[in-house]
Image (spheres, helix red, strand yellow):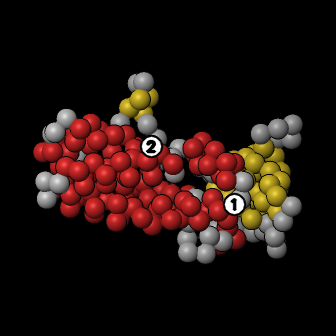
Amino acid sequence: MPTFDGNEVPLVSRDVLDALEQELEDPEAYATYVRLNHGLWPARHQRLVEAIRAGDATGAMDAVLSLKSASQMIGAMQLAELALTAEHALRDGRLREAEELLQDLEVCGTATMKQISREYSLGASNHLDDIDWTELAGKTVEIQSPNGVTDYGEVDAVTVDGCILWLKLHGPLPRRIVEKAAGVRVRIIR
């Protein structure tokens, strides 16, 4: 796993995704952008594989730069680091070394896209209402209502039927009960 300043680089950076969401100022535009980049992963990877295996240094450089910048934009930090390593190899004319990174890129990219899909609600409908509350214990979440975000914290416990959760808050109140009801949605942060 890549390291940066002695610290392990995360597969996906929530901070980058949060900054992107704030910059776009539109939750639907944000979800569409991340979902689009998520969906383009297989084609970006395949284009890089084909260019490297064909010995097309120019095509490989174009493909790796596309992969790196898209990865950086959606917070896919390990994938961006691996793409940067491949970029350096290509810039130095080490096509064989870049080819040796293809398997790592595929494994990392697949794991990254699975994490983004699982944790950031990028299903076809992107409905946050579809989240199974019984699986939320220990996760950091936002509680959303039609008026916006109402709370943020860690899910302490959930009832067996998934209709009620207890949220440990990051504020003056230590805990809050949240009932699953119309208009109440949960967004998994991590």
Residue 54 placement (x, y as % from top left)? 13, 59
Q: Foreground residue, 94 or 182?
A: 94
> SS at mark 2?
helix
Q: Which residue is mark 2?
A: 77
Q: Is 188 left or right of 124, judged from the image as shown?
A: right
Q: What residue type is disc 2 on?
A: Met
Residue 133 placement (x, y as % from top left)? 67, 65
> SS at mark 1?
helix
**Residue at point 34% right, 40% down?**
84
**Residue at point 77% right, 39% down?**
170
Q: What residue type is disc 1 on?
A: Pro
Q: Is 57 left or right of 149, judged from the image as shown?
A: left
Q: Is 154 left or right of 80, judged from the image as shown?
A: right
**Residue at point 42% right, 64% down?**
40
Residue 6 placement (x, y as % from top left)? 40, 24
Q: Which residue is mark 1?
A: 27
Q: Which mark is residue 185?
A: none
Residue 142 placement (x, y as % from top left)? 73, 53
